[in-house]
Image (cartoon, rainbow, N blue to C red):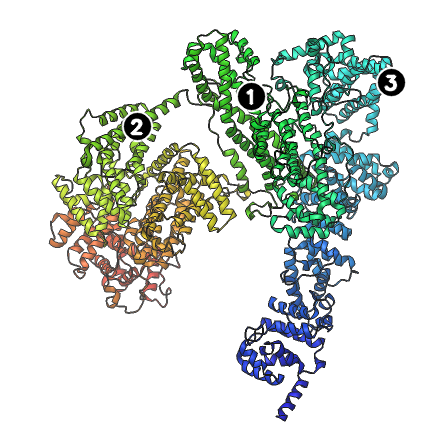
Amino acid sequence: MNNLHSSVQQLRSAVDVVRIVNDLGPSVTSSTSSFRGLIQRIPSQSLDEQSIGSLIGFFAKTASHPASPDNDDLSQSLVGSLTNDGSLNKTAKNGGEGTTGSSDWNYDVVARVFAEDYKGLNWTGVAQWFDSAEFYVADLNSLNVVLKLYRAGSNQPSLPYPSLFSSWRNNLGQLSLIAALITAPAELYTFQLNEVEAQDFLIGNPFPSKAWSCVALTSHLLMLSDHPNTQIQAAIRNLFRNALISCPEQIVLALVKIQQAGTGQNPGQKLIGEMMSQLLQVFFKPGRSAYSGHVIKRLWDIFPKFVVSGCVESWRSVASSPPTSEEWLATVMHIVGVVRLLSREREAEAGIRILSGGDIEYVLSIAFVAGDKDVIKLDTFLLEKINSEGMQFAFPLVAFVGKNYMAAVPRSEGHVPISIENIAVALKTLANCNKELQNQPTPNNNTPLSASIKALTEACIAKHPSLAHASVSSDEIEEMANSYFQKIYTSEQSIGEVIEMLKRFKTSENSREQDIFACMIHNLFDEYRFFHKYPDKELRITGVLFGTLIQHQLVSSITLGIALRYVLEALRKQPVPGGSGKMFRFGMFAVEQFKNRLHEWPQYCSHIIQIPHLKQSHAQLVSEIESAMQKAKAEAGLNSDNPADQSAQPNLQAVGQPDLTAKSPNSMSMPSSSDPSSFSMANNAATGSNAASGAGGAPAPAPVVFGTNLGKAVSSTGPETEHPPPPDNILDRIQFIINNISMSNLDGKVQELREIMNPQWFGWLGNYLVVKRISTQPNFHSLYLAFLEKLGDYGRGLVDAILLSVYLNVGKLLRSPKITILTSERSLLKNLGSWLGAITLARNKPILHRMLDCKELLYQGYETGRLIAVTPFVAKILEGAKNSVVFRPPNPWVMGLLSVFKSLYDVEDLKMNIKFEVEVLCKNLNVKLDEIEKGDELLTRVSPNKEKNPDFNTKSVSSTPAAVADAKVAAAGGGENFQEQTVIPNLAAYVQINPSVALFSAHPVLKRVVPVAVDRAIREIIQPVVERSVTIACITTKELIVKDFAMESDENKMRKAAQLMVSNLAGSLALVTCKEPLRGSVATNLRNLLQSAISANNITPMQEHEQLIEQVVQVCATDNLELGCMLIEKAATEKAMRDIDEALAAPLQTRRKHREQTGQPFYDMSIFNNARYPNALPEPLRPKPGGLGAQQLMVYEAFQRIPRQPVVAGAVEGGVAGAAGAPPAGAGVVADGNMKTLTMLAQKLNMSVNSLLAAAGNRSGEVTYMMLPENHEVKSIIAEIRKVGGASSDDVSLSFAQTIFKQMYDLTLNEPLRLESLIEILTAVNEGCSKLSKDVTVWITYAPMSTEEEKKLHRTVLLLLVRAQLVKINELDAWMSHSMKGGTDGVWVEFAMYFVRTAVHERITSVSEIPNVIDTFTKISQKQGNYKKSVNKLLDDLRGSKAEGGNAEGGDNAPVQPASTAAPVSQQQKGVAQPAISKVDSSEGLGVSDIAAKNAEAIALASRNDPPQTRQSVTHLLDYWIRVYNETPGNEKAYAQYLQLLQQHGVGKSEENSERFFRVSTELVIEAVLKSGQPAEGGVGPPVLHYNVVDAYAKLVALLFKYMNSGGDASKVATQRINLLNKVLGITVQCLMASSVVAKNNSQRFDQRPWFRLLMNLIQDLNLPDPQLDSISLQILGVFGSALHVIQPCVIPGFTFAWLELVSHRMFLPNLLLAKGQKGFGLAHQLLLDLFQFLEPYLKKGELDDSIRTLYKGTLRVLLILLHDFPEFLAEYHASFTALIPNNCVQLRNIFLSAFPRSMSLIDPFTPNLKIDLLPEISQPPRILSNITGALGGVRADIDVYLKTRGPPTFLAELPGRLLNRSGEVNASIVNSLVIYVGMEAMQKEGSMRGGEMDILTRLLEFPPKNRYACICAIANQLRYPNSHTHYFSQVVLFLFQNATDEGVKEQITRCLLERLIVHRPHPWGLLITFIELIKNPRYAFWSHSFTRCAAEIERVFESVSRSCMAPNEGAGEGESVGIAKN
């Protein structure tokens, strides 16, 4: 024991703690006592900083390599012995403290020990000792351990930078730690940044890593990058590479700081250079970074020299490019943008520093473009450079202009390296430089600089003649202008001569003359202020000249306005001695010159004639002016009483004429039309003369001035208090807080604001919140109020600042001259009112009168015409009282205001929207308007003039005495003036007046009141409706547009989208809002006018006309309602477009300037100030750099595509509808009347049948239509329907018939009379509508067959329709045959069997009329299946029926003769649903068949029968789905909600609605894809389409299919799903066929791509592995296969390539062929037959064009894949495929003949001494699924007889003729079937070569050579893989060769075999065997025949064959054909 203790002591002294801990394992950390005990046994001097550091490194390594528990027991024992403590075993058994078992290191235990025992250590030193050889941080687990242990001991959050970034010996370990810290998530580790680095961190990407803002980190990594270890270099490069991608902004800032602080010998210079080259591309190239502006500003603050260098390097990268290239221009524009940015936001001289940083070429290139963009003054810049640098700059300037002047264009034409204007500047600058410099010699040829300047000037003028006068100085222009004036005043030139000269100068192309003209006009106007000092003579000349300029239209637009205002001001001066009198005389001289033009400006004239002294002293002039005014009114067709004067008066501002109302200092009494405060005064002035004359000259009342006594908010006009903003870094953080505030993070944001916000900045913040947030974001008022509440006492100062700012901005808005005009300003005011009420009244705080007197505000608003703005403002304030304890009603203050509102509400003619605000307020306050007591104070106020007052409808006409008097006057004059009184031009031409109205028939004169009533009603309603609609539409549109187009640079796109949206919204809102009010208003006005007109015209007695008046009112109001709605909608649309242009003027201007000045992409960062959006928007809806894409713009373009319903129906001839091509009046009425009559008769018929069946009682099921007598009511109604139907249009008849057809499928079979009567209705309608039969044939294809009852009903309906000849039997035959799918669809097989049996037995049809169905039944009877027995029995019954019917055409076999043996059936007879599948004759053409045409007709019919607005409704549903699909991908909940929405619209519930939805949806998505086409790159090829819409629609169909579940068990649900898929695909292929027909008929190219994409998506989505659909996977494939069969290439040739791609798709054809029991083989076989039917005519010709050749190659690839993966399929159907392949397609046929089962291993045919007879497979018959006997038809029976009896003798002689088709060629299908059938019969007799079978085969060789060759090929087609058929037919070939007496037969046999071997592989095994035997076996003497040596080429071929076949080891390789190398 003592020895053991001694050993342990020695061990403790000898080994370190890491070794001990490592050896002992995880058990030492099972508890703190264990770990502490272990450490205590180690000598204390070893547990220093180095030991702790090593331990941390060791534990970091264990975190990435968990310990193995293998030596766990040893570890526990050893630790226990070391610690002399038994606690270890105890804790280990109990799990320890905080452990998970002894197998895991418990780092919490270690951390606890470090924290408790070693916190006194120097932990910076501990971190330094991380630098050990074993230290390595492998992953985040390791880093977590390091940080946990270090933080526990040091109590510091981060590692010390001196230790972390010092020089380590273990560089790999250091790099591993740094890399882990960089990639660590923020919650694990964050680098500590200083203040400067923190500012850099906020720039750029919103979520960068703080690591790369740490300069120390970047600097240390750069130092390590010079390490010789390549592993370290690669790791560092990888770190920087990732950083350059994620946060290049932080990298460039850190590198620049390092470079600035360095000495030029910084480490990592190579890596810095590489990164800088990349970063320069990012920030100094256009469009690379959204944050380049922020970065460049920060770089300028840090190191301006770097920015200069960056700009220079960016320019050098494109310096070699042509200056006109896009790259050069974009780069230069970017540099110019940098210059502008820094000059504006950093220092004015920044641009000069950047322009001075490079060579001369750089300086001049940038300077000239910057001059074009007004970034610098080019002339000043050039002059300074010339003065400072002399010849060193002047001569390069000459060279630069000389190099670029040829490409110069005017500045207005876009971005160019040099503009003509700048050339002029440069030439002028060079011309004006000092003479000394011009005389200096140039460096190149020592000639003076002046000579170079002269030569350059001449060259520039020659190229650009407009530069001829560029060098003329402004002083010279001024001097010449003054000389002309001197000539005028000295009488050297008359005024007339000067005027003529000025006219010439004004229109001259000479810029010098234009400058002189402008200078003379400017000087004349500038001298106006000195006219009062002019002598009389000069004053007269000046006045005459001034007036003559106006008379001859030498001044216009703004200049004209100034001139007229100067004259008006002069005339207002008193004609007294002195300066004032001189100005008056000047005005008189001037006005005398242009008085002939005064009639052009009636308003101007009215101002002149109101000048008192002018009336007194110059009455003649005033009289002339008044005459001019009358003349103007007469020309405009107006009079002074016309209420439309305002609208008819020319708007001088609108046409660019002067603002005559601007006040001058001496004309304060002049009213301003732009200032609403003078509105009343203006009106009084306008009517002053009339008032004076009417009241004996009494003075007018004093005008009311708005704004007095309203409180400080409105009355105060003093200077605003400036609120200093916080520093930039604080300001950015405050804005970030406001931007991201929400209800969920209020507490956190409040705390952040408290930490950084000093109360001294409350004033700034309050104003910012009011201006930027509160006034524009009413939806967030509650959020901002909650924010202020959270601030508590701290925020009181902020609340006061906000309130003060609100009052200040309210005053600004109320004083604004545009408040009554601009809805945007009124909206801001309304929002401020809402906030003011919420922050005061709602919080029980008053609004003091000294700040704002609300009652006085309402009164003054009433007096001055500002109620339109004041009423909503005050109403919104009062809304805040609804939740107040103090101010809610009946608070006296509030009730006083409500009393004022009540008084205003009752004011006559007050606008409806103002009344509406009062009503809304009362509702919100829960106060009844009628109960409010009206005050009297309003009566004491000045009554406003309602004329032209925005608060009143001055044109509204009520039933006042005045209105009635007007009506009496008009009526008394015979109603002559009614039409003239309509303010809306030509309204009477569009007003509808029903001539059949009794009152108008008796008194036609009364018709004239209708247009007047409609006119008044429209004008009464239009303003409030338009105002409200436009306001809502503009606000909505602006918000959306500003958000969506935040990243859009093109202002034109933005404007167009806004106009489309706002016009649609405003029009729709107006339409909805105005309808009922307009109806009531028309009725009221019309009633009043009629009553007045009847009284005035003495039409008596009045009482008798009351009822007639009401009739007229109702009829006329209804007839003209749509007309009024249309006009109101039009007005709303036009106003909305004007208002939205005004609302978006600033954003549009910003984009325009940004584009012109910078050429960079535009980013509107203000949208991110919103607290919720766009951050909360899903990714697809967030604004992205680059603007909106084509798909996103479609959302706005869709507003344009939403059609309007026609609103003017039946307008008079020549009216609106007539002009638009509307149908003749009354046509719609007749059609509608016929439809109503037919519907009424059908209802009457139903009632009659109900009565009849009710009378029959229990025997109602026995009553039939045939039992009814001829005079029965039912038959009489049918006869009536026949008459009406014959007189109706086809559209009406078809629509009615479709309704009846649908009713049939709602019946049961219990009462046959109902069904028969409906059939009779259809029969009656069919007699007058020839199209009905075709449509019924289409309708029956959609009949429901889900249940047994529905099948029986459908079968009965079909029988009745056929019997009534409403369905063509041949089309029904084709459709039913197709539906059976060759016998695979059991439902349709059973249905067809029952139908055929009934139809034939009841003599409804005969067997000969349904050949396709009989053919299908025959095929079913010849193969094993569930229906074979039943079908055979049916066929036997049909034969019996045929025999009994005495048909002698074909005996018993005639009914079951397949259709393929009959004559070709035309496409028209094939039916709609089933395309022809028989062989396509080349003469029939391969275009769109009649099948497609009929489906196109069906689609067109269905579209015509769609309800109105169907496409709009479906469009909205699809748009909503696309948004759901894009915004919430994979969100099943969102999908389910949308499917519920579809159900609400009837999709899935109603067959009709579902069909309509899928049909219209298909049409819409295909149209959308085709419209999305963009030109292909390079303009070559078809347009590039975008398939987002199709993909979304396919996803919707897949979801509908998967979620389809209408109840029932699993089988019912499966049936429902298959029915839905049938419906969708049926509609899709119908639309596809219709689209192809339309394209063909319009001679357009049919684009198959969108259809392919749609079907491909459906195939992919619905055939993915899904447990829910596995049970019906084969049925799904069957539905797709049937659809593809319908649209086979013969039907739609233009879809062929897409069709082949779909058929061969990996999700379709392989799945079909992999189905259990080979159930999919039949459908795959049919689809490939469809392909070869299409190809056969082309392949037979042998000359393929490019498209068919490409299709052929694609077919070969598909077949080769099938040969490899599904050879059994090809082998088992080889017979039907080879029958369709022309004989010249040898390789194609070989593919089918080479197929053999995968379970078989082929024997090498070249094996020596191969005995085929002994092969086990050779006795096995092959499996053949092709219908062999079907093609034989009647020949089969005769063959059977001959093989049994060898008779009759004539059989063999007649046989060849029976095998020929009409063209005299062998029918390949019959011959192939014959050969196989005969061979099968022969093999049953053990393959004898001497029986009747060989007789038949030998007889086939007696054909002429061409047909004989076809028969030999049919025999060779059986030489395939080893089987009994191959063996037999190989013997047949050899036998025929040996026994043929005709050398030609042997030659043809050889040819047939040889040509199949000399083509490319594969080669059939049986063919090789047969040919080898033929040439090897001497019995056949092959080489002795002359045809083997007839030509040298043939002889060489046979020699090659001989070598290959007879010496395989020396010839071609195994399995290769002889001719491969040669072919």
* SS at circle 3: helix
List x then y, in percent, for residue 542: 81, 16
Q: Quadrant of residue 1132?
A: top right
> Do callouts 2 and 3 mark residues in contact (Cβ within 8 Å)?
no
Q: Amino acid at mark 1?
A: Arg
The quarter of the rendered structure image containing the C terminus is bottom left
The 10 Å Cα crowd at callout 1, few under 14, some 14 to 19, many 20 or more, is many
The quarter of the rendered structure image containing the N terminus is bottom right
- Please name which of the two marks, 2 or 1, marks the residue nearer to the observer: 1
Q: CA distance from mark 3 to mark 1?
A: 55 Å
- Left or right of 1297 in this view: 174: right
Q: Which residue is mark 2?
A: 1329
Q: Which residue is mark 1?
A: 1019
Residue placed at 40% from the left, 20% from the top? 1226
- Left or right of 315 in this view: 1521: left
Q: 874 or 383, which lies in front?
A: 874
Q: 1959 or 172, which lies in front?
A: 172
Q: Which residue is mark 3?
A: 533
Whether residue 1478 can be seen here: no
